[in-house]
Image: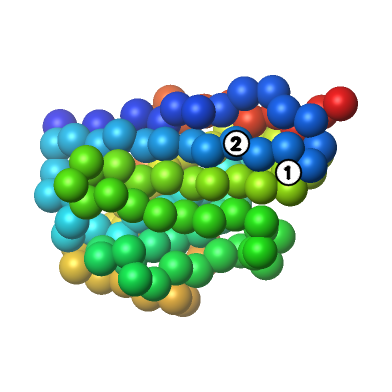
Amino acid sequence: EVRLAESGGGLVQPGGSLRLSCATSGFTFINYAMAWIRRAPGKGLEWVATINLSGSRTNYADSVKGRFTISRDNAKNTVYLQMNSLRSDDTAVYYCATERTPLIYSPYHTGADDYNYGGQGTQVTVSS
């Protein structure tokens, strides 16, 4: 059974930082590109960032580029999202997700529908 367990969210002031983690199990982690997607209050799912299988290539939504960093530890089957310079419009539930197809990484996969997610997510609230 595939398991994606997000953690690390919380309440932070504008300009602050958080580091999200996603511990995974039930599949061959190193065979999948990984992503973060988010859902802001009253809005649909938004793709945030993707990292390839080895961790050597990343891709970001324009809204987070330069502020967020995605990384992975293949020895720990875990993917991370370092979020800096947080803004109120970053408030959302954040989910980690797997590429739908193993052994594939595409910089053109920039929609939430390109990925599978299924964890509970972790709430990030940016507010003063």
Mark number displayed over residue 86: 1
The one of 58 and 41 positioned closer to us in this rendering: 58
Label 1 and label 2: CA atoms lie apart by 8 Å
Q: Residue at 53% x, 56% y: name it.
A: 69
Q: Residue at 65% x, 64% y: name it.
A: 65
Residue 107 in sight: yes
Residue 45 in sight: no
Residue 90: x, y in percent? Answer: 71, 43
Which corner quadrant holds the C terminus? top right
User: In the displayed structure, would residue 116 be above or below residue 14?
Assistant: below
Q: Secondary structure at mark 1?
A: loop
Which corner quadrant holds the N terminus? top left
Q: Secondary structure at mark 2?
A: strand
Amino acid type at mark 2: Leu
Mark number displayed over residue 7: none
Residue 5: x, y in percent? Answer: 35, 29
Tell me if 108 is positioned left or right of 61 in this view.
left
User: In the displayed structure, would residue 128 be above or below residue 58?
Assistant: above
Contact, mark 1 vs mark 2 (Cβ under 8 Å): yes
The answer to which image quadrant residue 30 occupies is bottom left
Mark number displayed over residue 18: 2
Mark 1 closeness class: few <14, some 14–19, many ≥20 residues within 10 Å: many
Mark 2 closeness class: few <14, some 14–19, many ≥20 residues within 10 Å: some
Amino acid type at mark 1: Leu
Residue 62: x, y in percent? Answer: 67, 67
